[in-house]
Image (cartoon, grey):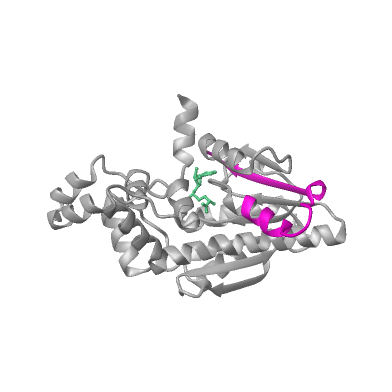
Amino acid sequence: MTTIAWRTSRRKNFTRTSASIPRRLVREGKWYLLPAYALARTSDLAREGMENSGSFRFADHIYRAKPGGRYGIGWLLDALFLALPASRSMRERHLHSRLHIATALRRGDVQGESVRVLSVPCGIARDLVGGANDAGLGTPWPVAHARLIGMDLDPEALALSRSLAGRDGTFEFIEGDALDASSYPRELDLVVSTGFGEFLDDDDLTRFYAACLSALKPGGRFVTSGMSRSKLADRLLRELAELHTRYRDAEALRAALGKAGFTDIVVHSDRYGLQSLATAVRPAGTP
Ligand SMILES: C[S@@+](CC[C@H](N)C(=O)[O-])C[C@H]1O[C@@H](n2cnc3c(N)ncnc32)[C@H](O)[C@@H]1O
């Protein structure tokens, strides 16, 4: 029991507090949102968002971009939600991580050097598996030189990641707390993180970034993102799913990375203007 309480206290992405969202809407006099709530529940994406706000399944559904839902209308609504700029923009952060993973793996392959990559928290580690596939396109996959590690607090996410990765010995999935620097594997070349910082306050974000920094080799790279507010998506997520996101623009992200000790910070906006996509480097000589 202690373990469950310990885990629950460190889960940073479940922001829903009401036992029943419809009851809360009525209590707050927002009964006019009830039909929207009932309709939205036919979409797989919206239902997952409402039942488990901020879950790895919610993020993965957006990255996979395959609509699913009940009674036809649910499928259509799901396709509509997936086409919103906010969803397309979340996919951009996933592609940003994948691109850096593939680039690091290709570079390691060309230089004949081993490459150690961590995705934290990995959720369903589609970034690692996708990045590995992207790097291996057209050539035999350079298994011998790569170690792709996913870390998450949730054993279910780790089991789903293992089955996505298949029997490939290149991958390793470990249970660990992203806010505890001692949980991390060391001597990493690349750390990627999406969908976590958005649930952390500024102090925890600095702690998290500092843990990522200390797990990297000097010269190692950190790849992450921050989200800006999309009015429509924010309203839907707040009212219907109680998903409360910490929005941070490029400047805020740059400041947080700098505070944790990173240098060579580059932040650019995705094409929808909703995600800030960042890379940063662990300088030589950091303790
Ligand atoms: C929204 S998902 C994002 C996962 C993935 N990076 C992505 O972009 O899909 C957030 C993940 O954070 C994990 N998580 C929450 N708090 C954590 C913590 N303190 N340490 C490790 N994992 C945590 C959850 O189990 C979940 O898998």
- Whole-percent x and y of residue 176? 59, 39
Residue name at image x 79 percent, y 52 percent? 142
Across the whole image, how many numbered discs are drawn on residues?
0
Q: Position of residue 206 (x, y in %)?
A: 56, 57
Image quadrant in which you'd find residue 246: bottom left
Is 66 left or right of 129, judged from the image as shown? left
Q: Residue at x 23, y 53 (%)?
A: 39
Residue 196: in sight, yes or no? yes
Q: Nearer the viewer, residue 142 or 150?
A: 142
Coordinates of residue 157 in the picture (x, y in percent): 53, 40
* Residue 172 image position (x, y, % from top left): 68, 40
| Closer to us: 117 or 15 | 117
Numbered range of the magenta stretch: 129-153
Q: Is residue 219 visible?
A: no
* The one of 154 and 128 positioned closer to us in this rendering: 128
Residue 168 within the segment the image draws in magenta? no
Query: Where the C terminus falls, by quadrant?
Result: bottom right
| Up-down relation of residue 108 to residue 11 (above or below) | below
